[in-house]
Image: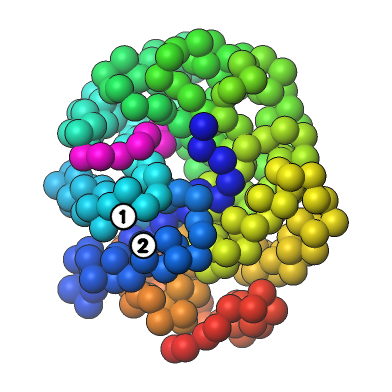
Amino acid sequence: MLKGSLVALVTPFDDHNRVDYAALKRLIDFHVAAGSNGLVVAGTTGESATLATEEHIELIGRAVEIVAGRLPVIAGTGSNSTSQTVDLSVAVRDSGIDGYLVVVPYYNKPVQEGLYRHFSAVADAVDKPVMLYNVPGRTVADLLPETVARLAEHENIAAIKEATGDIGRLRDIQALVPEDFGLFRGDDFTVLPLIAQGGHGVVTVSGNVVPTEMAELCRLASAGDHDAAKAIDDRLQPLNKALFVESNPIPVKWAVSKMGLIEPHIRLPLTEFSEQYHEQMLTAMSGAGVEIFA
């Protein structure tokens, strides 16, 4: 079972708005060296909604090649169309990925039975573990604990990234699913209480900037060393806050660019990080011990 800090990797773009594969290699090598426990490629933080299908498939394949078995790679393949989600998931099935992250369909506002059938159709079509991704702040539809429990009965549905921000939600899910069903937080603010109540880790945005610290936080919390984990958590909270002063991944791409790893380019309709927040971000990065180069 996957555990710990799974980094929701940013997708670097070059000056011509193309995927920057040289920068992608720098990012991946950085996370391998820093001790991240896995990478989520082409998720929300990876601007999956702006990737053309061919780009999406190539990005996942190239990421797997660069990783070369050094870390688990989870491929983001969700969309608001069941058939498109299935097609994309099948297209990357043999690329060497270790699993899928599939978001609740957005905009369509499906009912719970529709969500159950959507995720079941994806799981039926693949042979790798599927992580459900519930983020109603973006998708409107909310994957309820009872539906998660139904889906957990499928042999290919292995985990959930829960991003409602409600600490009690994962406790409700935990009571309904098998013990080996993976429970991951989708926000960096509440990782510590999640793991303390038996959760397995986080799909992290902050881990793009502080990968070693996020992995160590998860490790210490899982080992029951609450005081040491809390010391790291307290130090990172200003950074967690700064990374969400504007829509993700606007702030985190700017932060990673200041580390000298990527250019700060982002695709419309998202726009450049507002100058009014630059000082807050730099202060938070410095407080978290991040070396700033740019």
Q: What is the CA distance from the residue labelled 1 to the residue labelled 2?
A: 7 Å
Could you say whether the residue bearing mark 1 is in a helix, strand or loop? helix
From this view, report whether residue 181 is shown above or below residue 11. Answer: above
Q: Residue at x 60, y 82 (%)?
A: 282
One can see residue 215 in this view: yes
In this rendering, is residue 254 above or below 92?
Answer: below
61 with respect to 205 (left or right): left
Which mark identifies residue 67? 1
Q: Residue at x 66, y 74 (%)?
A: 288
Q: Residues within 10 Å of mark 1 (few under 14, many from 20)?
A: some
Q: Which residue is mark 2?
A: 28
Instruction: Kindly identify the residue that appears in the image at 72 percent across and 18 percent down.
Output: 175
Query: Mark 1 touching mark 2, by CB under 8 A?
Result: yes
Q: Quadrant of the C terminus?
A: bottom left
Horizontal side of residue 76 vs 280, given as left or right: left
**For the magenta stretch, what is the residue range?**
95-102
Which amino acid does the dot numbered 1 rest on?
Answer: Val
Question: Does residue 44 appear anywhere in the picture?
Answer: no
Viewer-closest of 31 and 106: 31
Amino acid carrying mark 2 in the image: Ile
Q: Give the residue displayed 71% in from the left and 43% down from the top.
A: 222
Sequence-first tag of 1 and 2:
2
